[in-house]
Image: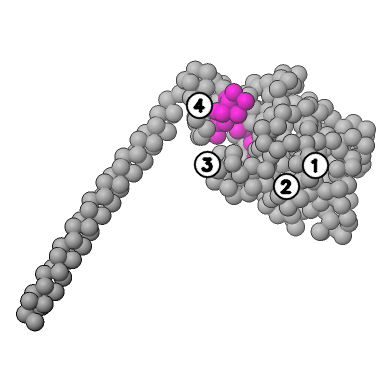
Amino acid sequence: MLALVEHSYSAAVSFQIENLELNHRDTVRNVNETQWLTRTSFAQLEKLRNRFDYVARSCKDIRDRYNEQEDGLYYLTTADGMVYQTFCDMTTAGGGWTLVASVHENNFNGQCTAGDRWSSQQGSDANLPDGEGNWSNRNTFGTAEGATSDDYKNPGYYDISAQDMSVWHVPNNFPLKHWSLASILRYHTNNRFLSLYGGNLFELFQQYPVRYNIGSCSDRGPAFPIVYDFGNKESTKQLYGPNTRAESEPGFLTFRPINYERAAMAICSGVRPTTGCNTEHYCIGGGGHFPGHLCGDFSSFDWDRLKGGTGWSASKEMRESAVLLFYR
């Protein structure tokens, strides 16, 4: 009996020692992992902080001069010396794409309400056909990191002289590090069309304002073919309603088309109008007045639910994604 007790006691002590050794090893491993993560975090932060020393007007300048090939936030400087931070796509089609703006719809029930910076925050008003006028002015707003949660416009929108554009459609509120993988569409132009319009959208819309009562809907605006980085023509078609698919063609980036009510939209996302003039259902941005229709940055993307019609609403995926605009 005594031998059994001694054996049990010895086993218990041995078990406790083994547990102590395991706990010690776990503690040491956790401390080492924490120290490694801390060192890694500081090294990454130092690497990001060093980007502040770059002198460049665009992400293409950074890629060409400093051989940076990693997507992320970088600092740029305008011709007048203003320093600002934005996102650079350094991998798509050779990289060097500068995020200059995002268009985000936060309230489909509103009529040009707070947050509709690309149309009007003052309501639909025929006396204010330009609305906020942010397509053709130097106002800036928002942050690059929050570009899928709110409207964004940085000085690069008017300061950079670019040749092509890239567009990403990213679901609302996605964090920056997941933008590329989360995108429902990504595409770019490669024909240097911006060179024809002063090098950026600011100059383009200075020449061709976005407003109401401006022309005939036979003016469907300049359209340029796109190269898909994610998605294709068929997936683009399916992101819009059946009526939209019947009067538009996917595979293009279109600017300033006129609708039936003589209102100019700003950009048609991945499509061009062909046989119809109902561009408010598939083009974004505009002036401060959309007679007979909703008013907002995505003015009539949700027409069916709110107005009882059939076939005009864009898909939920398109309605709930921000449109990110890049230059190169």
- Report which residue position mark 4 lands on: 69
Which of 229/142 is in front? Answer: 229
Give residue 318's mark: 2
The amino acid type found where label 1 is placed reads Lys
Query: Residue 49 lies in what quarter of the image?
Result: top left
Percent x, y of residue 271: 80, 36
Q: Is residue 58 left or right of residue 234?
A: left
Q: Secondary structure at mark 1?
A: helix
According to the picture, the residue beneath numbered tag 3 turns out to be 177
Instruction: Label 3: state its secondary structure.
Output: helix
- What amino acid type should be assigned to the residue bearing mark 2? Met
Q: Left or right of 265: which side holds 103?
A: left
Residue drawn at the location 18% of the way across and 57% of the way down? 21
Q: Is residue 54 magenta?
A: no
Q: Is residue 286 visible?
A: no
Above or below, comparing residue 110 to residue 32 in the picture:
below
On screen, residue 198 versus residue 18, left or right, reads: right
The answer to which of marks 2 and 1 sits earlier in the sequence is: 1
**Secondary structure predominantly adopted by residues drawn in magenta:** strand
Which color scheme did the rendering employ for the protein? one colour
Where is 246 relative to 252, above or below? below
Q: Position of residue 154 (x, y in %)?
A: 60, 34
Label 4 amino acid? Gln
Give the residues in magenta: 85-104
Check the picture and name the quadrant holding the C terminus: top right
Measure the C-alpha gap from mark 1 to mark 3. Answer: 27 Å
Say which mark, if any, is on residue 217: none
Judging by the rendered image, the residue that carries numbered circle 1 is: 237
Taking the image as shown, residue 35 lies to the left or right of residue 225, namely left
Q: Quadrant of the N terminus?
A: bottom left
